[in-house]
C-alpha cells in the first residue's frame, strides 16, 4: 500500500480503505435483509414477536419514566433496547431455522464445526465411509475431540480407529468423542457447539499447536469426498449467520 509522509497511508489508500468498508457494510445489510425476508415468509410469528418486543420494551420504559418523571429520557432508551431485543429474536429464530433445515443432512456436523469461533483447529472428514458417515477431528483447549455423524454402528468403529492412532501421538492429552444425532447418548446438531464449549480446559494454545503438528499427517488421509456442509435450498445461510454475528 502506498504511503504518504511519515509512513502514513496516502489519500488514495485511505479512500480505497473507506470504500472497501462501505462495500462490506452494504453486503452485510443486503445479507441481513435477505435473511429477514426469507425468515419472514417461513416464520409467520417472526414479525409479531419482533414488533411485540419493540413496542413492549418501549412502553415499559416509558411507564417507568412516568413514575419518576423521566419518561422523555427513558423513552429513547426503551426504543434502543426494543430494537436490540427484536434483533436478538430475529437472530435466534434464523439460527433455529438453519439448524432445522440442516438436521439429518450429510456434512451437517462439518458445517457447524466450520463456524466455531475461538481457538479451535478443525479437520473435517479424517475418516469416512462410502455411505457418507464421517468423523471430524477438533483440537482445542479441552484436548482432542472426535465428532461423528452418520450411522452410529459404522461411526463407532471409525472413532475407535482414530482414537487408537491419535493416542499414540498425543500422550496424556484427553480425547473426547461425540456422535451427532437425536437418539439417546447422542448430541443434537443444534447443541454441538454448546457441547464443545462446555468441555473442561485441559491444555494451552502451545500444546494445541504441538498436537496439530503431530496429527497433520492424519488430516491428509484420503477418503470419500464429503460435502462441506448442508445448505438450505436457495439460501446462503452461512453468510447470513456471519452477518448477524457482526451486528
Image (cartoon, helix red, strand yellow):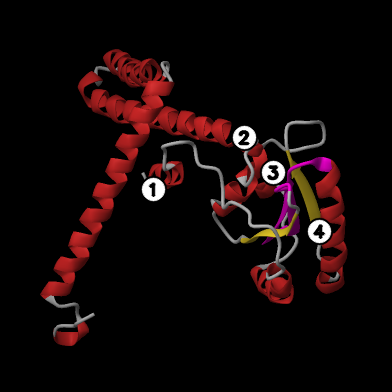
> Residue at point 74% right, 48% down?
148
Q: Main secondary structure of the magenta part?
A: strand
- Residue 150 is situated, as x and y percent measured from the top left of the image, at 74, 43
Query: Marks 4 and 2: CB-CB under 8 Å?
Result: no
Q: Is residue 58 magenta?
A: no
Identify residue for label 3. 195
Image quadrant where one finds the N terminus? bottom left
- CA distance for labels 4 and 2: 26 Å
Mark 1 nearby-residue class (10 Å; few <14, some 14–19, many ≥20): few
In the picture of the structure, the residue carrying the numbered disc 1 is 246
Q: Which percent across, then down, holds residue 138?
A: 68, 58
Q: Would you say 215 lies left or right of 59 here?
A: right
Which numbered marker is on residue 175? 4
Q: Is residue 149 magenta?
A: yes
Of helix, strand and loop, which one carries label 1? Answer: helix
Residue shown at the point (70%, 48%) measured from the top left:
132
Place of residue 11 in the rendered image (x, y in percent of width and height, measured from the top left)? 11, 74
Left or right? Give the position of 197 relative to 150. Answer: left
Q: Range of the magenta residues?
A: 131-152
Residue 103: assigned label? 2
**Marks 1 and 4: in contact by CB < 8 Å?**
no
Amino acid at each position: 500500500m502506498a504511503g504518504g509522509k511519515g509512513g502514513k497511508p496516502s489519500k488514495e489508500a485511505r479512500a480505497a480503505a473507506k470504500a472497501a468498508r462501505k462495500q462490506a457494510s452494504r453486503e452485510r445489510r443486503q445479507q441481513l435483509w435477505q435473511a429477514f425476508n426469507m425468515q419472514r415468509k417461513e416464520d409467520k410469528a417472526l414479525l409479531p414477536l419482533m414488533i411485540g418486543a419493540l413496542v413492549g420494551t418501549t412502553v415499559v420504559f416509558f411507564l417507568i419514566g412516568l413514575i419518576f418523571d423521566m419518561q422523555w429520557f427513558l423513552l429513547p432508551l426503551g426504543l434502543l433496547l426494543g430494537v436490540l431485543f427484536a434483533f436478538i429474536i430475529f437472530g435466534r429464530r434464523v439460527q433455529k431455522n438453519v439448524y432445522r433445515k440442516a438436521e439429518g443432512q450429510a456434512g451437517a456436523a462439518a458445517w457447524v464445526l466450520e463456524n466455531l469461533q475461538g481457538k479451535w483447529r478443525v479437520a473435517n472428514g479424517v475418516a469416512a465411509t462410502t455411505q457418507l458417515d464421517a468423523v471430524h477431528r477438533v483440537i482445542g483447549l479441552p484436548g482432542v475431540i472426535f465428532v461423528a455423524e452418520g450411522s452410529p454402528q459404522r461411526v463407532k468403529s471409525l472413532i475407535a480407529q482414530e482414537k487408537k492412532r491419535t493416542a499414540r501421538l498425543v500422550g496424556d492429552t484427553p480425547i473426547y468423542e461425540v456422535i451427532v444425532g437425536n437418539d439417546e447418548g447422542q448430541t443434537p446438531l443444534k447443541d454441538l457447539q454448546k457441547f464443545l464449549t462446555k468441555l473442561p480446559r485441559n491444555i494451552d494454545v502451545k500444546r494445541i499447536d504441538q498436537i496439530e503438528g503431530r496429527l497433520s499427517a492424519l488430516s491428509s488421509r484420503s477418503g470419500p469426498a464429503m460435502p462441506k456442509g448442508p445448505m438450505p435450498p436457495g439460501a446462503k445461510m452461512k453468510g447470513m449467520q456471519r452477518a448477524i454475528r457482526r451486528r
